Structure formats: C-alpha cells, structure tokens
Amino acid sequence: TPDVQAPTAPSSLRSTGVTGSSVSLAWNASNDNIGVTGYEVFVNGGTSPAASTTGATSVTVTGLAANTTYTFTAKARDAAGNRSVPSNSVSATTTGSQPSSSKLIVGYWHNFDNGSTNIRLRDVSPKFNVIQVAFAEPVGGAGSGNMAFSPYNSTVADFKADIAYLKGQGKKVLISIGGANGTIHLEDAAARQNFVTTMQSLIDTYGFDGMDLDLEGSSLSLNGGDTDFRNPTTPRIVNLIQATRELLNRNGTGFILTMAPETAYVQGGMAAYGGPWGAYLPVIHALRDRLTYLHVQHYNTGTVMALDGRAYAQSTPDFHVAMAEMLLQGFPVGGNTSAMFPALRPEQVLIGLPSSPQAAGGGYTTPANVQKALDYLIKGQSFGGTYVLRNPSGYPGFKGLMTWSINWDKFTNFEFSNSHRAYLDALP
C-alpha cells in the first residue's frame, strides 16, 4: 500500500543570520512514519522552493536583494513524496545599502477598468517605490463612515499574496481613500467610529503599509465661521483628523500616512480661506507630526497664486516650482501674516503629476519640463523662468514625484516612470 501519511510540520522556524544577499534559517525536525528525507523552504508565499536540504534542519537562502524584508516557511517531505503543511512563518531583512536613490516615485494603481490598462498588482513597474491602491470607498452613503474595498481583477487571496510579494521587493503598498467618486462626510462620532473600524479591518485583512487621504469634492469643506486652520470647528474635518490619528496610533510608528489634495484645498488657502479653499490645511497641520508624504495634485486646476503674488498655470515648470515652494516655505493663510501655515520638511513634499495626457483633464507636463522644475527645486539650477526661489540653493531633501497613474503610465509605454526614475537615480 502506498504511503500517504505526510510528515509533521517543521517547528520553530527562525532566522540565524543575514547578509546583503542571503538569510540563514534553522528549524526543529519533523517526524514521519517512514522517515523524513528533506526539507523545502519557500519565500513570500511562493509555490516553488527557494532552497532545499536532504535531511539537515538548516539552510541559507541566497540571491536575495539587499535591504529587503522576506517571509519564509518550511515544509518536510518523506521518501514517498508526501509533504507536510507549512511551518510557522518568519520574516528577516537583508542588510545592505538603501536603494540607489532616496527619491521616490509614488503611483496610483486602478482598482477598476477605465480603458487605460489592466495590471495585476504584482506586475506594477519596479520603477515605483510606493503603490497607492485606488480606492477604498464609502458604502451606505457618504455619511455612513463605512469603508469598503475588494479587488476587481483577482481573488482576495491572490491580492493579499500580490501585496506580500511587492513588500518583499521593498515596496510600500497603501490603501487610498476617496478619489473622484468616493465622497466621505464624517459628520458625527458614529460615522467616525465606523470609519476607524472598517478601515482597520481593511488594513488587517490585506496587510497595507499605510493609508492615503485622496479626498476630493465636498469631502472637505470649511463651514461658515471656521476661520483658524490651527483650531478647526467643522465636524467633518475634526472627525477626519481624530479618526486618522486613532488609526495611526493603532498601527504604530511605521504606518505610513500620505495625502493627495487638489491645489485649491492647500495652496489655494493663501488667497482665501473658506469653503473648499484651504480646507485640507487643518488636516495637514494637525497630522504633520505623522505625515509621511504630501503630494498635491498639480493637475485639473486653474491658475494659483504663489508666494511672489503672481498666478501660475498648470503644465509649466514655474507652476511646479512655485506650488512646491509654498509648502517648503510656508505661507499666510487667507493672506493673514498672523496665521502662517508652517513649512513642511523637504522629505515630506512631492509633486503630483499626470503620467500621460489622457490621465487628467489638464496638467500633463513633458518629462523635460518636469526635470527643468526639479533641477531648480532640488539643485537651485534655474531654467530662466518667471518664478524665483525664496531659497536660491534649492531643497536637496525634496522627496520626488507622485503620478496618476501606474495604469496610464503603462498606456504610454512607461514614459513617466522610466524617464523620471533615471533622472532621480542620477541625483547626488
């Protein structure tokens, strides 16, 4: 009679050492009725062994990327070819230098088919550092606070595996909230608590590294009489701040928070403060201690007044430099010099751009013109434009670029990610 009894699972899988390209592992032996003949080690949920042994209870997995976290499991096999269930999982991070550039490209991945391209999450171009999964949206109305997400082109299990795969490559995968169709109004404590509970469930289910606030339209709007960004009174703004803070506290200091407001809601608050104008400023200000990246959308916008009192138009190097420096210098909210919005740190600031002309109604900027703006903004190398930096030497710590979107970038044969990754990697 053929033997069909599988060995017991290896126990106490543990990391015993790491280098820049390898992880050494050990485990306690399995038992089997006819004898264990070897073990197989799997990486990041893969189905093919990354390493195997003929009886030894230790192995070194090689060929790994530096400064990257990997998750391992082990299985035992016997002479009849039966395999055990997996061991416990263990994670280990290889040593080594950071990626070649500290500058980031952040991209939004469509959880829908809009005629651009359909991309499995794990197949996102490796040129992106941070992937924003777009979007978690409200269910039961804008005021319910209940947030939902389900992958449109894969099973939940495959999507979770794709997120784990990308994290194993050193990427960060965030869940983005809102979007053009995802209006959210947290008007009361019940909606706020629903938001926290349902968002935490999504974070736990999928293993997201953080969350992105991409609230547009009426999601954030200042009520009449709400005139001080440092002490907001509008319920939907106060509740959003409190809910986000609770999620940050629950998920620890490594949890990433990003925001992608439209220009009216941020830089537009210098010319006027009320309604949509400047409505993101109290949220940014209250959470600035935990804000990882702010990437304002430099698209689908009219002209915006800059620090020099001039109005600049989208799609131009002047616009990108002027809008970014408002965040790097700070500005008087509503023109009131006694209500200064304080500067953010350079490493918190990115520029948001369309990856192709089709990706937005306006604001597409050629790679050459984007890089003119970056040369000035980062290195202080002027392109001879109208806007003059307040800090003439530039901001070497400026963090990089965001794009809508990963899918539209593929649609135009990766023009955005290829050209800008090469530029950012070449910076000193």
Image (tube, rainbow, N blue to C red):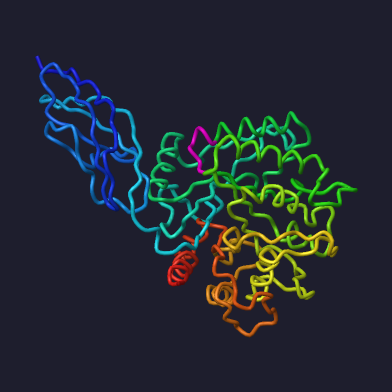
Please state the horizontal and vertical placement of residue 372, each as a whole percent of the image. 56, 77
Left/right placement of residue 397 relative to residue 418 reads right
Membership of 39 in magenta stretch: no
Residue 384's image quarter? bottom right
Q: Which residues are magenta?
A: 203-209
Left/right placement of residue 380 relative to residue 30 reads right
Q: Is residue 237 above or below residue 368?
A: above
Camera-side residue: 325 or 78?
325
Residue at x-position 83% and y-position 57% = 273
Please state the horizontal and vertical placement of residue 169, each as a whole percent of the image. 38, 50
Residue 101's image quarter? bottom left
Q: Going by the picture, which residue comes out furthest to the top? A: 1
Please state the horizontal and vertical placement of residue 140, each as a whole percent of the image. 69, 32
Residue 281's image quarter? bottom right
Residue at x-position 34% and y-position 42% = 92
Camera-side residue: 205 or 179?
205
Q: Is residue 31 above or below residue 44?
A: above
Residue at x-position 61% and y-position 48% = 290
Camera-side residue: 36 or 327?
327
Q: Is residue 403 above or below residue 164?
A: below
